[in-house]
Image (cartoon, rainbow, N blue to C red):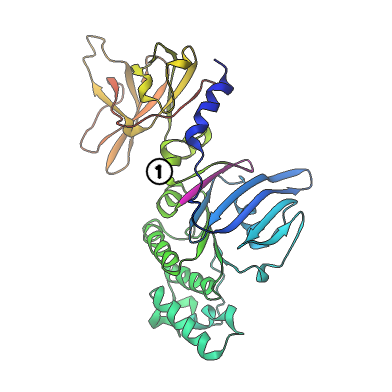
Amino acid sequence: MHNDSVAAVRREYEVEEPASDTATMLQLDGVTKRYGPETAVEDIDLTVRDGEFLTLLGPSGCGKTTTLRMIAGLEMPTNGRVSVDDDVVAADGDGVAPEERDVGMVFQEFALFPHLTVAENVGFGIDDWDADEREQRVTDLLELVGLGDFADRSPDNLSGGQRQRVALARSLAPEPDVLLLDEPFANLDVRLRERMREEVRRIIKETDVTAVSVTHDQEEALSISDRVAVMSNGHIEQVGRPETVFEHPKSRFVADFLGQASFLGGRLARNKIETGIGTLSADMLQGLSDEYDGARLDVLVRPDDLRATPCDEEMQTGNGTLVGRQYTGPSFVYGVELDSGEVVHCEHNHATNHELGERVTVDLVADHKLAWYPAE
């Protein structure tokens, strides 16, 4: 069976669109950005619904920040169109200025004005409002972000998390249609970063603003987003709910980028596939049946899909040898070199301690369908 035929079958469960009964707030149609001979972003189509929190996720240089800057108006697309609330704000190299787009932006460095108080920073973008309305808006936002008692403080006297909340309040003050966040947690320490994810999501959901975030942090994207758009080399590889993108990645790139990924190779024959850990039924593979008999496939398994059980070395049993061990706190992740030559990873409770060089039997313990790819 040809690889393109196999790939076509997988599209049945790869595509995941936002709910059609919600209005579109942000639309990108065929958006491309070139810098001379270099193409940073190519032919991106993306729909973000009203009130949705979507994250652009990918490694450095994949085009996610360039995409965000085109939405903000800091860059213009070479080709394609950007629309906000049905208004075209950029098309084919031209567009309206950032301040005319009803788009707010939270920068990675927060970019607060040190000579202004917290309240003055929050009200900076609405200085043309009626004074009483401006004061009330600032008060309401500071209460929302938990800084009601900090109005007269200088940003220099705030913690990193507090400065981030001030930046968020300032971006929300003009009531933008779309809020953009550029690596919003990158400058925070690990524990504060985790707490601020929940806080920022709460604030955004309470204000019912449409939000688009950019990050290279997989855990951040999966924990904070309604949907995730995974990018690579200027293209969107896959868009979907976090659990869908993680459990059913469209490509090897998405599988590898979202957590540890191992692959078991084999040929499908009579509704079964022989792998380095034994025989798997085709029923375990998402979207696969015996009509693809004879195709060589690679099956995606993650550490929690597998268990390694020590066996009697003298009897030469088992199907692999422990070659790596990573302690994560709650668990150990063991690397196992299978007799087939493949290396897989198995997650175990932290109380289970195996030694490197141990002979083990690796078994599949997954209780869900497994993703697969045409063999390379």
Q: Nearer the viewer, residue 76 or 175?
A: 175
Query: In the rendered image, which residue does mark 1 sit on?
Result: 243
Which residue of the protein is positioned furthest toward the bottom in this rendering? 132
Mark 1 Cα shell of 10 Å, populated few (<14), some (14-19), many (≥20) = some
Taking 209 as reference, is 73 left or right? right
**Residue at (24%, 23%) from the top-left corner?**
309
**Residue at (28%, 39%) from the top-left corner?**
331
Percent coordinates x, y for residue 146 in the rendering: 38, 74
Q: Nearer the viewer, residue 181 or 93?
A: 93
Percent coordinates x, y for residue 131 in the rendering: 55, 90
In the rendered image, which quarter contains the N terminus? top right
The picture quadrant where one finds residue 59 is: top right
Which residue of the protein is positioned furthest toward the right in this rendering? 36
The picture quadrant where one finds residue 366 is: top left
Provide the residue span drawn in magenta.
Answer: 227-236
Q: Main secondary structure of the magenta part?
A: strand
In the rendered image, which quarter contains the C terminus? top right
Taking 125 as reference, is 286 left or right? left
At label 1, the amino acid type is Glu
Secondary structure of the residue carrying numbered label 1: helix
Taking 327 as reference, is 74 left or right? right
Percent coordinates x, y for residue 12 in the rendering: 49, 33
Percent coordinates x, y for residue 61 in the rendering: 62, 46
Q: Is residue 74 magenta?
A: no
